[in-house]
Image (spheres, rainbow, N blue to C red):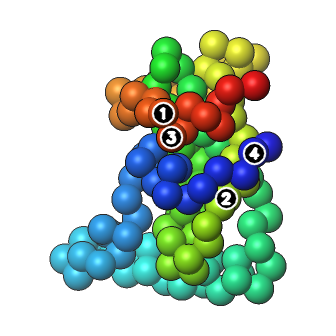
Amino acid sequence: MKLIPTSVILKFREFDRETVYHNPYACIGGLIRTNLDSLSKDIQENGFKNNFTLLIKNNKALLVDGNNRLACALRLNIQSVPVDIEYYDKLPDDSYKLYLGDKLHKMIKIDSKLNQFLIK
């Protein structure tokens, strides 16, 4: 686990929850709004219960777990978030790789801001 600035992770989110949250015409907007409101309150009171998961493959990255929590972190002005870094080629479970397969096209090239947190 590494603490990575929220501003650095923001670029690699799979889905911008706040865009849907603020769109009154999105049918899922109300559900996400309710979820983010209660999740934000819980995070404010208890902190993060789970780490975020950043997937790395071929010099690209994608936040595959924690998109809702990232939206809450932005709301709460949390400066850094706990991130587990997983390397796609080292994942042991083929079914998990299959699940992630449809997300790989969304991956974004790693920039220097994120790269400094990936150096071992």
Q: Position of residue 105 (x, y in %)?
A: 35, 27
Q: Looking at the image, is 72 positioned above or below residue 56?
A: below
Q: Is residue 107 visible?
A: no
Name the residue beneath numbered marker 2. 81
Q: Secondary structure at mark 3?
A: helix
Residue drawn where x is 60% and y is 39% of the image: 54
Between 1 and 25, the one lying in front of the other is 1
Between 67 and 116, the one lying in front of the other is 116
Q: Looking at the image, is 91 positioned above or below residue 37?
A: above
Mark 1 closeness class: few <14, some 14–19, many ≥20 residues within 10 Å? few
Mark closest to the chain's N terminus, 4 or 2: 4
Name the residue beneath numbered marker 3. 113
Residue drawn where x is 61% and y is 20% of the image: 88
Q: Secondary structure at mark 4?
A: strand
Mark-to-mark CA distance, 1 and 4? 16 Å
Name the residue beneath numbered marker 1. 112
Mark-to-mark CA distance, 4 and 2? 8 Å
Mark closest to the chain's N terminus, 2 or 3: 2
Q: Position of residue 62 (x, y in %)?
A: 49, 37
Q: Secondary structure at mark 1?
A: helix
Between tags 1 and 4, which lies in front? 1
Name the residue beneath numbered marker 4. 2
Horizontal side of residue 49 vs 20, given as left or right: right
Quarter of the figure with residue 84: top right
- Looking at the rendered structure, the kind of residue marked 4 is Lys
Q: Looking at the image, is 58 positioned above or below residue 68?
A: above
